[in-house]
């Protein structure tokens, strides 16, 4: 009898609990904590825009510096550097992540194409994170190195000393490649081809083009002279025109070839250098707490 | 008694958790049906995240794939169709996922992959039941890869009167023959261009070839053999080869226009299933 009563009572209690759970359950998936958990899941899937939306909803009810950092970091990953920098700014004061936020704020300026602002901030030292100062000094040197010419490079010893032992050899190699790029002078190439057709092409290491240009220009000139001597005016002028065309074309082509040669050197260097820096995340820190 | 109590305790929790996921699914479906694909993906993903029992793994992954596909994010679509495929519970679901992967490959123009998958499907499935679907999508893959004859053959396997087969045949008939354009240009310079409707280019080609042909032959007649060889090689042959290549290029360009016109017709007027 008692058991039967207990059973009935239990049914009533649990149905009531169930009903209240049901009323609450409508918002369960959208509860503050679940928003954060779902946001973390999306963030780790690199679905940053959706993650940011979830985090923004979460922050309406809770305060969490890691979540704020992740929002700013997500914008950064999406290439939305202005929003990223603005969001990092909100963590500058009274936050355990203030140093990291300052670093990321400055790198957002750097990678967002606002290098002047980056250098201004670095010089003013207002938001300089002490902990990450060496990283930022290295970044500023990298920027200077990237935009400088072979004659205006920073001191090699200082430049290489900024990197850890494993990177020193590679950076010294890049420095040497930039210092001695082995460019060809377009004017020299043009003058060489003017003096002897094809020589400019040989200078720019286009050997087969150089030999072909020499033979064709010589042949056309010979035929033009020979036809003038034989009084075949039409063909004589035709070959004269062709000889002049090949001669002028070769001078222009040699100068262009030197420029292409130089562009190739620049492209290969920039490509290799950029690949190496990206591979090493520009020697900036990676954060374990972002996605565990 | 204890078991009964435990059952009573757990029943409403499980029931309402279930209702919660169902409601979430219905909400995501509603967004999907309204064409709000971005939002629907978010809600489907939320459902997947909280679906501990993996009850919705197949249907939700498939829907995310479809939403990505509708948003022209084909790589992501294939990723989610593949996840749905892993969770497929019967041959119909497997076939649906594979078909969607094939259709997405056709849309993103990875035709070789589409053909590979169609071949696999043909080998591993109940072929008789799905053979028309295989022919149909293979036809589409060929058609969008500009191989209209193979496409026509595939649609003909479904029916000789198939609407798209007729369209393919029309395209084949309307197309210019690149080989013919080149061959007649070999015989008479400029004629290939005239065949493809480029009259001015054809006449220019004819004139240049006549001029350099005259100078070359004249050199030989005057016993200036070396002059003839040089002019013939550097000028006449260059214009002659250019004329042939030009004729082929014009024919190819016209053919692209014809194919695009047919594809536009399919996009705007064809009522059947499209990739």
Image (cartoon, coloured by chain):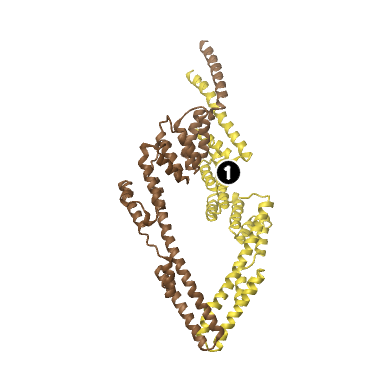
Chain colours: A brown, B yellow
Horizontal relation, residue A10 to residue B132: left or right = left
At x 55%, y 49%, the residue is B125
User: For the view shown, which residue lies furthest in the top direction?
Assistant: A1
At x 61%, y 70%, the residue is B247
Q: Position of residue A113 (x, y in %)?
A: 47, 46
Q: Residues within 10 Å of mark 1 (few under 14, many from 20)?
A: many
Q: Where does label 1 land, which residue?
A: B66
Q: Is residue A90 visible?
A: yes
At x 68%, y 50%, the residue is B271
Horizontal relation, residue A155 to residue A78: left or right = left
- Give the SS element for disc 1: helix
Q: Position of residue A265 (x, y in %)?
A: 41, 60
Q: Position of residue B33 (x, y in %)?
A: 63, 39
Nearer to me, B228 or A15: B228
Q: Position of residue B115 (x, y in %)?
A: 54, 55
The quadrant where residue B259 appears: bottom right
The quadrant where residue B165 appears: bottom right
Nearer to me, B46 or A119: A119
Nearer to me, A272 or A10: A272
């Amino acid at each position: 009898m008692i058991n039967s009563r207990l059973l009935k009572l239990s049914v009533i209690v649990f149905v009531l609990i169930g009903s209240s759970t049901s009323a609450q359950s409508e918002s369960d998936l959208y509860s503050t904590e679940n928003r954060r958990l779902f946001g973390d899941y999306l963030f780790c899937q690199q679905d940053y825009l959706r993650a940011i939306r979830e985090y923004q909803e979460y922050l309406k009810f809770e305060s969490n510096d890691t979540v704020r950092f992740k929002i700013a970091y997500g914008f950064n990953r999406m290439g939305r550097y202005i929003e990223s920098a603005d969001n990092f700014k909100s963590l500058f004061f009274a936050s355990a992540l203030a140093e990291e936020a300052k670093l990321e704020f400055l790198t957002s300026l750097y990678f967002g194409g606002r290098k002047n602002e980056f250098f201004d901030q670095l010089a003013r030292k207002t938001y300089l994170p002490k902990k990450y100062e060496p990283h930022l000094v290295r970044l500023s040197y990298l920027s200077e190195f990237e935009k400088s010419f072979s004659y205006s490079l920073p001191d090699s010893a200082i430049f290489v000393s900024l990197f850890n032992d494993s990177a020193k050899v590679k950076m010294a190699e890049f420095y040497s490649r930039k210092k001695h790029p082995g460019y060809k002078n377009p004017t020299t190439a043009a003058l060489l081809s003017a003096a002897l057709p094809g020589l400019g092409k040989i200078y720019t290491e286009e050997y087969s083009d150089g030999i072909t240009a020499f033979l064709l220009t010589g042949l056309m000139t010979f035929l033009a002279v020979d036809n003038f001597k034989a009084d075949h005016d039409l063909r004589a002028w035709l070959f004269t025109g062709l000889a002049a065309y090949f001669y002028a074309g070769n001078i222009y082509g040699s100068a262009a070839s030197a420029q292409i040669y130089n562009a190739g050197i620049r492209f290969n260097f920039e490509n290799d250098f950029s690949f190496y820096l990206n591979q090493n995340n520009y020697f900036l820190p990676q954060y374990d707490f972002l996605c565990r | 008694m204890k078991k009964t109590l435990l059952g009573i305790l757990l029943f409403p929790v499980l029931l309402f958790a279930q209702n919660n996921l169902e409601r979430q699914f219905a909400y995501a479906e509603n967004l999907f049906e309204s064409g709000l694909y971005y939002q629907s993906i978010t809600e489907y993903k939320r459902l997947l995240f909280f679906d501990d029992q993996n009850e919705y793994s197949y249907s939700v992954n498939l829907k995310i794939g479809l939403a990505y596909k509708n948003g022209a994010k084909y790589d992501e679509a294939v990723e989610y169709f593949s996840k749905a495929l892993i969770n497929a519970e019967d041959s119909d679901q497997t076939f649906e996922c594979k078909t969607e992967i094939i259709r997405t490959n056709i849309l993103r123009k990875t035709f070789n992959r589409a053909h590979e998958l169609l071949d696999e499907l043909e080998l591993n499935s109940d072929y008789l039941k799905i053979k028309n679907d295989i022919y149909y999508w293979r036809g589409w893959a060929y058609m969008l890869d500009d191989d209209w004859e193979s496409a026509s053959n595939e649609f003909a396997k479904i029916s000789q009167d198939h609407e798209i087969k007729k369209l393919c045949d029309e395209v084949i008939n309307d197309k210019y023959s690149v080989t013919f354009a080149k061959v007649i240009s070999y015989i008479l310079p400029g004629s290939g261009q005239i065949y493809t409707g480029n009259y001015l280019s054809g006449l220019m080609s004819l004139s240049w070839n006549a001029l350099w042909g005259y100078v070359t032959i004249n050199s030989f007649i005057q016993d200036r053999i070396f002059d003839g060889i040089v002019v013939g090689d550097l000028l006449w042959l260059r214009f002659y080869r250019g004329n042939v290549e030009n004729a082929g290029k014009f024919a190819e360009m016209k053919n692209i226009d014809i194919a695009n016109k047919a594809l536009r017709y399919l996009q705007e007027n064809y009522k059947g299933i499209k990739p």
